[in-house]
Image (cartoon, rainbow, N blue to C red):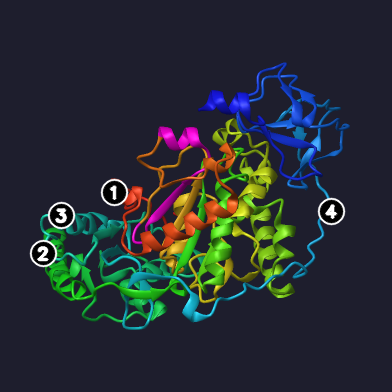
Amino acid sequence: MADTLTLTRNPTVRLDESDNVVVARVEIPKGSRVEEEDITALQDIPLGHKIASRAVGKGEPILKYNTIIGFAGEDIAPGTWLHSHNVLIDAFQKDYRFGEDYRQADLLPQSDRATFMGFRRPDGRIGTRNYIGIFITVNCSATVARKISRYFDEERLADYPNVDGVVAFVHQQGCGMEMAGEPMDLLRRTLAGYIRHPNIAGAVVCSLGCERNNLDAFFEAQGLESGKLLRTVTMQQIGGTAEAVEEGKRVVREMLEEANHIVREPCGAEHLLVGMQCGGSDGFSALSANPSLGRAVDTLARHGGTAILSETPELYGVEHTLTARARNEEVGRQFLERINWWLGYTDGKDVQMQGVVGPGNQAGGLANIIEKALGGAKKGGSTGIEAVYRYAEPVTAHGLVIMDTPGFDPVAATGQIAGGANLIAFTTGRGSCFGSYPAPTIKLATNTPLYDRMQGDMDINCGVVIDGDATLDEMGDEIFRRFLEIASGRKSKSEILGVGEEEFAPWPIGVTG
């Protein structure tokens, strides 16, 4: 199929008439003519990389999607391969235009909104899965949590068909850190968000007994109260590791009976809260999977649902396009404050926010963080930004929101799920194999070769947009339908593979000795 495309279709993709670059749809050998652009390739152009569509003088802006992604490091002739060696980052004036492009979602009447089959909790929140979670206050109780969860294998859960599983949420923190302040607040907020998550039917919290993240102080700070579906086990009080494991098994058995009585029922799409991630991005991310997901997000917002755009360091460089879409200046400045915090936090460090993206991103065609951010922002569609949240804060607004998280996918998704996300949509061009509990991950491939190579991990092939076989709107419709199907119980590829337990990763900011 690739040979046919090379012979019969335009080998490049033009994103905006104002751009001075086009993107290689296929590998373009040196000397090849690109008739639609009236240029000849002066070097071999890898798939997903950029080629100059006209002459660009040294220091002039390089435009992709009519957005500056860098500046020419030399005089560039038409047909030149453009990448990190000749697309340089430099400071330029940004017009934040707070709220000027804000567009509120055009909400559909309740009777016209899509539905899915979800689990309704007593407080009215809706889950897409039905798990028992085993949590820990400190890493010292991790083994106990693992042993409890692994005891409840497929055979032992056969009598509880409405329960999706018993999962341990293990982390590396809880001691050797400040007892107060932001690090402890982040950890406790994250744990409480998971314990309260609508996909968690019941929770057991395991502690050692002497940790700095004291169990009683944690419950008090987060307003948690023990009850039939929230139990605690303290190793030093109950007699040690073996006794704690047995007690955990006992209370889980009691919870399973209760959780199994909950059955799926029709629920409106306004109860869907989708966390958006992109990892292993490539030159096609901004052309296929990310804008397709953006179309699905616009549809979700019209149905009353919510989507979370995150990975703050990976939005740097195009933050002015997002502040312009903010509900008002206050929301825009809240986002800008987080960008500035990250600039200070990463100053002098060898991280992508300071310009250089990872080796996989570079191989995939991304020259710098601005180009990566341009693609990442496409996940947010065109709907206005309603609110900005700190890491793991409960998301209460509907529509498109931003949550401040690092760019590292497990940490970022953990914050989104703690905030209430009951689905994760994850775009990838290089082939991320991410999964998550208790919210299932749906993986979107940016290109057909990746999808064909990794069908066991990829849920949807957005590469058909690049191939010319589907439009962005058609892909957006397919992604939205898949949201409803996965939310109703269809297993995602990562769930089938059992990926997600190790990906629980609260942000370890400020851990000290």
How many numbered marks are there? 4
Q: Secondary structure at mark 3?
A: loop
Q: Earlier in the sequence, mark 3 or mark 1?
A: 3
The disc, 2 or 1, on the residue closer to the chain's N-terminal end is 2
Residue on which the image places disc 2: 159
- Amino acid type shown at disc 2: Asp
- Image: 115 above or below 136: below
In the rendered image, residue 490 lying in the magenta stretch gets the answer: no
**Residue indicated by mark 1:** 496
Residue placed under numbered mark 3 in the picture: 154
From the top left corner, tell me how far across and down residue 280 is, in percent: 52, 41
Q: Which residue is mark 4?
A: 93
CA distance for labels 2 and 4: 63 Å
**Mark 1 or 4, which is nearer the eye?**
1
Residue 415 lies, in percent from the top left, at: 47, 62
Magenta-colored span = 437-453
* Contact (Cβ within 8 Å) of mark 3 with mark 2: no
Q: CA distance from mark 3 to mark 1?
A: 13 Å
Residues at marks 3 and 2, CA–CA distance in whole angstroms: 10 Å
Q: Earlier in the sequence, mark 1 or mark 4?
A: 4
The answer to which quarter of the image holds residue 397 is bottom right
* Above/below status of 77 relative to 191: above
Q: Are marks 3 and 1 in contact (CB under 8 Å)?
A: no
Q: Residue at x 41, y 65 (%)?
A: 422
Magenta segment: does it hold 452?
yes
| Residue 486 percent coordinates (x, y) | 37, 59
Question: For the C terminus, which image quadrant?
Answer: bottom left
The residues tagged by marks 3 and 4 sit, at their Cα atoms, a distance apart of 58 Å
